[in-house]
Each structure stands twice: as C-alpha cells, then as structure tokens.
Image (cartoon, rainbow, N blue to C red):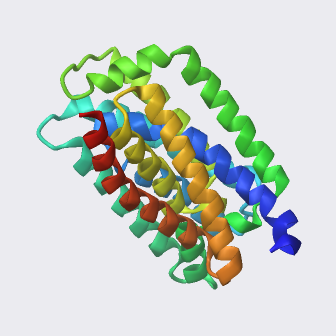
C-alpha cells in the first residue's frame, strides 16, 4: 500500500476538492428538488467531449473544454428560462429529457467510430486515479473561483433555494443562470476524470447525509464534506487494495456510508428527544 501512496495523492486531493464543492451544490439542488440537474449538466459536458473525440481533438485540449463549456452555457440558459415558459411539465421531467437526449446523441456520434464504446464507458465511470497535478490545479482554480462567487452572494442563493417551489419571479432567471453556469463550470473541469456517476454521487449522497443529521445549512455542508472525504479515502483505498475500478469503488463506498447514516440518524433523534 505504501508504495502506491505517491500515485493516489493527486486523485485523493481531487476527490477532497469535489467533496467540499459538490456538498454545497448538492444542498441547493436538494432544496430546489432538481435532483438530476447534475446528471444533465454532466451529460452535456460529456457530449462536448464526445464531439471533440469524434473530431479527433485531444480530450485534454482547450478546444475540447470550449465545446463542453458552450453546451453547458446553452443548458444553463435553457434550464433558467424553461421554468418560466411552462409550469404544466415538472422541471425534473425536462431535466430528465435533456439528459436522455444528450446521452442518445453521444451514442449516435460514436457509434461508427473506433473505440467509441470505450469512450462512453470512460465518460460514465471516469478515470479519477489517473488525474494529473495539472488537472488538480485546474479543478482547484475553478472551485475557488466558483466558491468565492457563491460566498459573496450566499444569502441570495440560499433564499432562492429555500423558496424555489413557492416563489416565482422573472428576476430569478439571472440568478438561476449563474447557479447552473457555476455548477456547470465545475462539471466541465471534472467530468473527464471523475465521470458522470461519481460526480452525481458527490453531489447527492454527502448532501443527503447532511440533511439527515442537521437542520442548519452550514452544519449540513460540514457533514456532507466529511462524508465525501471519508468516502473518497475509503473508496480509493478499497480500489487500490482490491484492484477494482476506482470510480465505481468510490460510488459504492459513498452509497454504503449513506445507508449506514440512516440508522445512525434514528439513534441521534432518540438521544435528542
């Protein structure tokens, strides 16, 4: 185990950064009841990566990231406006439609290309174990930028999330766009390494654990960050020892931590009552 330690420091650092960032976004997503928004945004970013793959662009190139960013911006605009265009169709249904159509388009694009199936599998499962320190630094820079912006306007974002289903205003369109865009930026710089499944897990599972144990947004974020960090360390260790795929191991361990938290929350409630 000690001989592989230098090789897992970068992936562990990336997972820690994602744990801190995604736990925050996850709490907002759960309050807004748009659970699958991250899947849709990640799939849009993956569609941009797939376009780059089909055009023989290096997947780590600026051109590939620009393609993903363009689709993320388009998605952010669409999700911001569609809520005010129609109230008859639930927003979660529209989010699901975008996800499944984006997935189908990605499959159609790679259907006739060599190694297309491996590309799709890589986008779903990621390759977090092979992230470089350059990738970690890029992810850190984006998360710091996004985190600073949300810290400055934290009360505004929290107010909108709390009243998301009860209060509708056209003034929210701009703030919704900024929320989706900032989440999308993190996704663009992490989807190739982390994969769609792991990004979704980091977004929803730690935040759900935070909701189980506390009513305070700040405490929920701290608990979510701790759960994400524990899941990352245990998942990478389990993957390394058992020689299993890292992304799937991380998702599985995070899921186990969630199911463990359910009975623990019952014990906590009995002690508090």
Give the left or right position of residue 1, taking residue 152 as reference. right
Q: Residue at x 73, y 40 (%)?
A: 140
| Position above or below: 191 against 55 | above
Give the left or right position of residue 80, taking residue 231 as reference. left
Q: Residue at x 71, y 69 (%)?
A: 56
In the rendered image, which quarter contains the N terminus? Answer: bottom right
Q: Nearer the viewer, residue 109 or 203?
A: 203
Q: Position of residue 197 (x, y in %)?
A: 49, 63
In the rendered image, which quarter contains the C terminus? Answer: top left
Tally the numbered discs: 0
Q: Position of residue 240 (x, y in %)?
A: 71, 75
Give the left or right position of residue 2, taking residue 15 as reference. right
Q: Residue at x 84, y 53 (%)?
A: 133
| Position above or below: 43 against 225 | below
Q: Position of residue 125 (x, y in %)?
A: 56, 70
Q: Nearer the viewer, residue 267 or 236?
A: 267
Q: Residue at x 33, y 42 (%)?
A: 268
Residue 46 appearing in the image: yes
Q: Quadrant of residue 263?
A: bottom left
Q: Nearer the viewer, residue 178 or 258?
A: 258
Give the left or right position of residue 65, taking residue 19 as reference. right
| Position above or below: 212 against 45 | above
Residue 192 appearing in the image: no
Q: Position of residue 52 (x, y in %)?
A: 65, 62
């Amino acid at each position: 185990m000690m001989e592989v330690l230098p090789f897992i420091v970068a992936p562990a650092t990336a997972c820690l950064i994602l744990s801190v960032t995604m736990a925050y976004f996850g709490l907002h997503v759960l309050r807004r009841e748009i659970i699958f928004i991250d899947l849709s945004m990640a799939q849009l970013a993956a569609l941009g990566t797939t376009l780059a793959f089909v055009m023989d662009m290096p997947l780590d190139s600026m051109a590939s990231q620009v393609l993903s960013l363009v689709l993320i911006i388009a998605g952010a605009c669409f999700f911001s406006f569609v809520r005010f265009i129609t109230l008859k169709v639930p927003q979660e249904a529209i989010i699901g439609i975008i996800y499944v159509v984006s997935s189908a388009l990605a499959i159609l694009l790679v259907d006739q290309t060599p190694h297309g199936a491996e590309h799709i599998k890589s986008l779903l499962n990621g390759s977090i174990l092979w992230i470089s320190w350059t990738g970690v630094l890029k992810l850190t820079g984006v998360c710091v930028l996004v985190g600073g912006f949300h810290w400055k306007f934290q009360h505004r974002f929290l107010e909108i999330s709390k009243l998301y289903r009860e209060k509708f205003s056209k003034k929210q369109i701009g703030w919704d766009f900024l929320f989706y865009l900032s989440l999308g930026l993190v996704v663009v710089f992490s989807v190739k390494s982390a994969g769609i499944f792991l990004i979704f897990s980091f977004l929803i599972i730690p935040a759900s654990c935070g909701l189980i144990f506390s009513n305070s947004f700040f405490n929920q974020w701290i608990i979510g960050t701790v759960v994400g960090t524990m899941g990352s360390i245990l998942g990478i260790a389990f993957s390394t020892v058992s020689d299993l795929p890292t992304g799937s191991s991380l998702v599985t361990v995070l899921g186990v931590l969630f199911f463990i938290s359910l009975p623990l929350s019952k014990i906590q409630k009995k002690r508090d009552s």
